[in-house]
Image (spheres, rainbow, N blue to C red):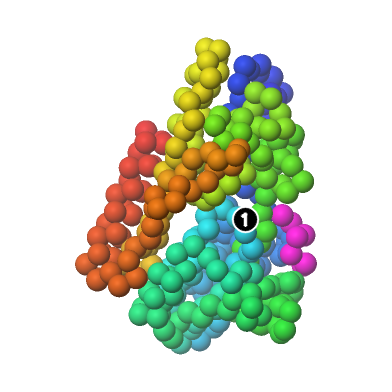
Amino acid sequence: MTLESGNTLSYDRLVLAPGIDIRWGALAGYDEAAAEKMPHAWKAGPQTLLLRRQLASMEDGGVVIMSAPANPFRCPPGPYERASLIANYLKTRKPKSKLIILDAKDAFSKQKLFQNAWKELYPDHLEWVSLSEGGKVTAVEPGEMTLVTDFDKRKAAVANIIPPQKAGRIAEAAGAADRTGWCPIDPVTFESRLVPNIHVLGDAAIAGGIPKSAFAANAQAKVCAAAIVKLLAGEKPSEPKLINNCYSVVGPNYGISIAGVYRPVDGVWTEIPGSGGVSPLDAPGSTHAQEAQFADGWFNTITSEVFA
């Protein structure tokens, strides 16, 4: 393994958590220069700050358009969580404005829960256009702030383009990514199927039914660590089970969630039937308020665990 300084390190087992990179050029017209006008904001830092500035400086009455990609991508409910936050901002700060989601899919994570919340909270400020309704964005024209679909063109005051993605660059450099751009792994140990003694965690891994979520990545790290201890001792790792629990805050005091339990089946992570579920569609406001509190609690717990 070579460091930026030029120094090299040897290893018995190497664990990579590459995260994601953007597939520049996979969406016609969308490259690094275009992202400075139409931010993806899917990697934290300057891009998220740029999107915030654009929303803050937009005139009331401007149209915000978000494009959501086809699967797979980092955080399946992420575009719809962000859309909810933007819609709440528009409702409270720029009430003449509206957000339109152009989606390359007909279905998404916690869809009915999100749509129920949008109908209740943002009926005049958020519109979702599915794949079958012409929502797939096929190209962008940054100079005109225009998104092109199979059926029409839409001009935006602010455009948030969430483009196709792949495993982070280091995964490709290590030879751990296949032609899909993602990293095939053994589900018991998370060892790369392409490069021996390298383990790949998180968004970059092809993890079957397990979503690309922070909760899942944290759980994968623990399973991988236990497997490596066994491997270094010359023992066979135990077959693991993984839990994923994902909270989404759709508005003030309005949370929803989805959970699942997964195990390896025929070399692929598969959800155990009947193991999980989503928030009730008819849940009262008190339940949504409680789930919003759970979301805050989970965030505090995982950040303290990861960074303490």
Q: Is residue 16 above or below residue 152?
A: above
Question: Residue 239 placed where, x, y %?
Answer: 49, 30
Q: Answer with the quarter of the image where residue 137 lies.
A: bottom right
Q: Main secondary structure of the magenta part?
A: loop
At a point 73% along the width and 49% down the height, the residue shown is 180
Disc 1 element: loop
Question: Is residue 158 visible in this depiction of the protein?
Answer: no
Badge count? 1
**Disc 1 residue type?**
Pro
Residue 224 as seen in the image, left or right of residue 166: left
Question: Is residue 83 visible in this depiction of the protein?
Answer: yes
Determine crowd level at label 1: few under 14, some 14-19, many 20+ residues with C-alpha closer than 10 A: some
Specify start and end residues of the magenta stretch as a single range.
Answer: 23-29
Which residue is outermost to the top?
233
At a point 58% along the width and 79% down the height, the residue shown is 129
Q: Is residue 20 above or below residue 189?
A: below
Question: Residue 103 placed where, x, y %?
Answer: 60, 71
Camera-nearest residue between 107 and 175:
107
Q: Is residue 253 magenta?
A: no
